Amino acid sequence: MKAYIFACNNKTMSECFTRSLFGVNKPYVTDISPGDFCYLYNYSDQILYGVWKATTTCACHEPKAWGGHFKLQVRVQLISKTMLSIPFHQIRPLINLGDDVTWKLFNVRAHDLYEHFASEYASEIEVGRKLQKYDEDYRNKYPANFRCEDGHKVRSLSEQTIDNWLFHHKVIHTVEPIVPIPEKLIPDFMVETINGENIFIEFWGMLDDPLYKERMYKKFKIYADRRLPLIEIRPEHLQNLDFELSNKLKQKNVNFR
């Protein structure tokens, strides 16, 4: 997954919308492809808008747009039911690298930003159909009411502890990504190796709940059948999470600090 952030101000934003066209002068967009996610950052108001998908490759589609100032252009189409807006400070940890905005995002970062905008549409767009019934029931029974230090919302204090550990140790991660396979697997967390491979993290916690246990068995079978890389965290690991998670991340070649 790739995502591109385009910039505008109060003077140029309306033209972006009326033309369904985003443009810049920086070469980071030259490899954009139809289907890549696009966002528009208004630096006058410090608001990030979304969610669009590119419908063309990069070219000078309309030479006179914005008075001819921005020649690297892509046509876009809104894919959310309404245009969504998020104050920049709320998503700063997702798109900042040091003190600079990261204008092109890959994999975990791209997915995480998308989830902030359109989590209610993620299953339909990423997979093409609704989640399986047992996963829907689980989410209804255990809503994501626990807010983490990086802004993520999770479904338990234990998941909050894990998320905060990943955040403090500079591990780029996403919460409940949708894995694009027919089984519609939704791990608790996803991180990346130094080579860009996705690694999934599951916390197996509420084994006295029949619904939870059924869901765990189904998920574990998917991991085993498809040989997907998995890190398992259990309640007893939380007592020494720094040791347990550090070792497990090292074994999977995931960087942390």
Image (cartoon, grey):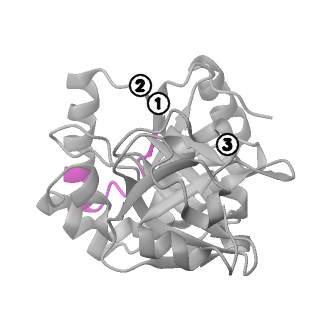
Q: Is residue 184 left or right of residue 237?
A: left
**Residue 207 horizontal/vertical position (percent):** 33, 54
Q: Amino acid at mark 3?
A: Leu
Give the amino acid at mark 2.
Answer: Pro
Whole-number angstrom distance, CA of label 2 to CA of label 3: 19 Å
Sequence-first disc among 1 and 2: 1
Front-most of residues 157 and 59: 59
What is the CA distance from the residue labelled 1 to the residue labelled 2?
A: 8 Å
Q: Which residue is mark 3?
A: 241
Q: Viewer-proximal residue, 7 or 250?
A: 7
For mark 1, give the secondary structure.
strand
Q: Which mark is residue 198?
A: 1
Location of residue 13 by image quarter: bottom right
Q: Is 74 displayed left or right of 24 in the figure? A: left
Q: Secondary structure at mark 2?
A: loop
Q: CA distance from mark 1 to mark 3?
A: 21 Å
Numbered range of the magenta stretch: 201-215
Q: Residue at x 30, y 77 (%)?
A: 81
> Relative to residue 44, is residue 193 depicted above or below?
above
Category of crowding for the residue at label 1, using alpha-carbon neighbours closer than 10 angstroms: few (below 14), some (14–19), many (at least 20): some
- Mark 3 secondary-structure assignment: helix
- The amino acid at mark 1 is Asn
Q: Earlier in the sequence, mark 1 or mark 3?
A: 1
Find out whether the residues at labels 1 and 2 contact each other: C-beta distance under 8 Å: yes
- Where does residue 175 sit, x and y in percent of width and height? 49, 54
